[in-house]
Amino acid sequence: MDTMDAQAWGIVVGVVILALIAIAALLVYQKRQSHRLEQRFGPEYRRAVNDLGSKTKAESELRAREKRVEKLAILPLAPADAERFAQAWKALQGRFVDNPKGVLAEADQLVRDLMLKRGYPMGDFEHRAADISVDHPAVVDHYRAAQAIAARDQRGEADTEALRQAVVHYRALFDELLEVRTPVKPQPAQPMEVRA
C-alpha cells in the first residue's frame, strides 16, 4: 500500500511540475508577444491599450490588424508612379496660399489615391488608419491629426494655420507611403573559366 501511495504522489508531483512549467512557458510567450507588438506598433500600441481599455483587448486587435494586412497586396510604387505622385504633391503645395481649404481636400485625396495605388483598401477612415499602422506606425498619428483638423474645418472651426498643420501631417504620411520599387538590374553574365 505504501508503494502505491508513493507512486501516486510521484505522479501527482510530476503532473504539478509539468503544469507549472507549461504555465511559465505560456507567460514567457505572452510577454514576448506583448514586447513584439509594443516594438512594432510603438505609440499605436499605447493608443490601442487606452482606447480598448485593456492590454489583452489591444493586443488582440493589433494581431488582427497584422493578419488582415498580411492578406493585402501592399506594393511599393514603380518609379514613374512615385514621380507622378511627388509632382502632384509639389503642385498641391504651391496652391496652398491661394486656396488652403481646397488644398487640404486635395491633400486628403492625394493620400487616398496613393494608398489605393499601393494596395490599401479604401474602407472607412478607422480601417485605413488601422491598416497603415501595421507597416507605418510612426506616421499613423499624423493621419489621425490631419483627419481631425479636416473634420474641424468642415464645421468651420479651423483657421489657416490649422489647415497648414493638417497639410504638414498629410505630408508626413505621404512621404512615408511614397516607397519606390527599385528595378532589379540583370547582372551581366560572368565569363566561365575553361580549364584545359
Image: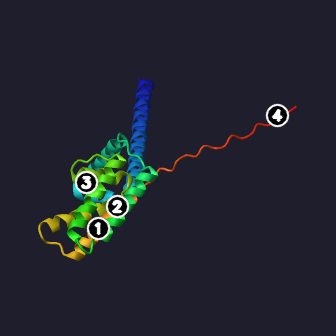
Q: Nearer the viewer, mark 2 or mark 3?
A: 2
Image location (x, y in percent) of residue 112: 28, 54
Helix, strand or loop at disc 2? helix
Q: Which residue is mark 1?
A: 167
Residue 179, quarter of the rendered image: bottom left
Helix, strand or loop at disc 3? loop
Residue 149, quarter of the rendered image: bottom left
Q: Nearer the viewer, residue 192 or 64?
A: 192
- Residue at image coords 28%, 48%: 61
Q: Which residue is mark 3?
A: 54
Q: CA distance from mark 4 to mark 1?
A: 63 Å
Q: Which residue is mark 4?
A: 194
In screen coordinates, is 61 left or right of 17? left
How many neighbours does mark 2 have within 10 angstroms: few (below 14), some (14-19), or many (20 or more)? some
Q: CA distance from mark 2 to mark 4?
A: 55 Å
Q: CA distance from mark 1 to mark 3?
A: 33 Å
Q: Mark 2 is on which residue type?
A: Ala
